Image: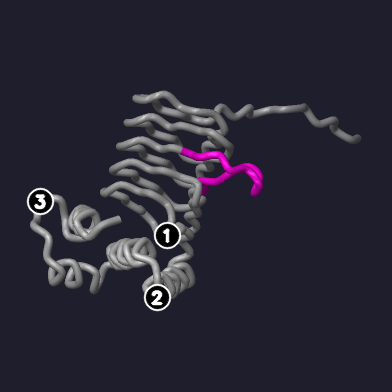
Amino acid sequence: MNIDILKECIRVEVIGRDHKFSWRKALTRTRHNRRKYFMFWWRVACYLYAKGGFKRRFARRIEEKLHRQYDVEIPLTVTIGPGLNLAHLSGIAITENCIIGKNLHIKQGVTIGLRTPAAQALIQIGDKVDIGCNSSILGGKITIGDNVTVGAHALVTKSIPPDSVYINQITPLIKQKCRAL
């Protein structure tokens, strides 16, 4: 990540799409908004981590503080395009084996991860994807196309084509219970 990408991400996610970037505006917007505070410091930590050296240790400290404070677990090695929107800062976990496009909207309780820890597969998520609350994207090689909506409480284990809405099919009755007299 270079400084221009960092500034673009902060401009879109913290300052606002219609405004020019300035560090002063970014810091002012983070003062009273928890979500913008998280996004600003997470992006700065990603930038510092990518630079390496002693900056990497400082980035890890920022990451640990954010994780303790917000219960959001997004590794600094994840590639996420500008426009990340976390609706509620609670219970979000994303694996490091993930490449995510622009304008991802995530609600609370979302898990994006691998089925087994030993799997080295990659999860790819396209642009303009909306993931509903308490949804899980689990598996190996999964690709979610551009402009996809994943419904609330959905379990995604297979790839989803572009321009789709994915809603989990839940069976309301599995087996009738016997009534004891």
Q: Say if the magenta span includes residue 140.
A: no
- Does dot 1 land on a helix, a strand or a loop? loop
- Relative side of 80 to 95, left or right: left
Is residue 116 magenta-colored? yes
Q: Which residue is mark 2?
A: 54
* Colour theme: one colour
What numbered label is drawn on residue 18? 3
- Between marks 1 and 2, how big is the CA–CA gap? 15 Å
Q: Residue at x 12, y 60 (%)?
A: 21
Question: Residue at 9% across / 56% down in the picture?
Answer: 19
Q: Earlier in the sequence, mark 1 or mark 3?
A: 3
Residue sitting nearer the eye, 43 or 147: 43
Q: Is 101 on the left-hand or right-hand side of 4?
A: right
| Residue named by callout 1 | 76
Q: Which mark is residue 1?
A: none
Tell me where residue 98 appears, x and y as whole percent. Answer: 46, 45
Q: Which residues are magenta?
A: 111-123
Tell me if residue 34 can be seen.
no
At numbered mark 3, what does the secondary structure look like: helix, strand or loop?
loop
Q: Amino acid at mark 2?
A: Phe
The x, y position of residue 179, in whole percent, is 85, 33
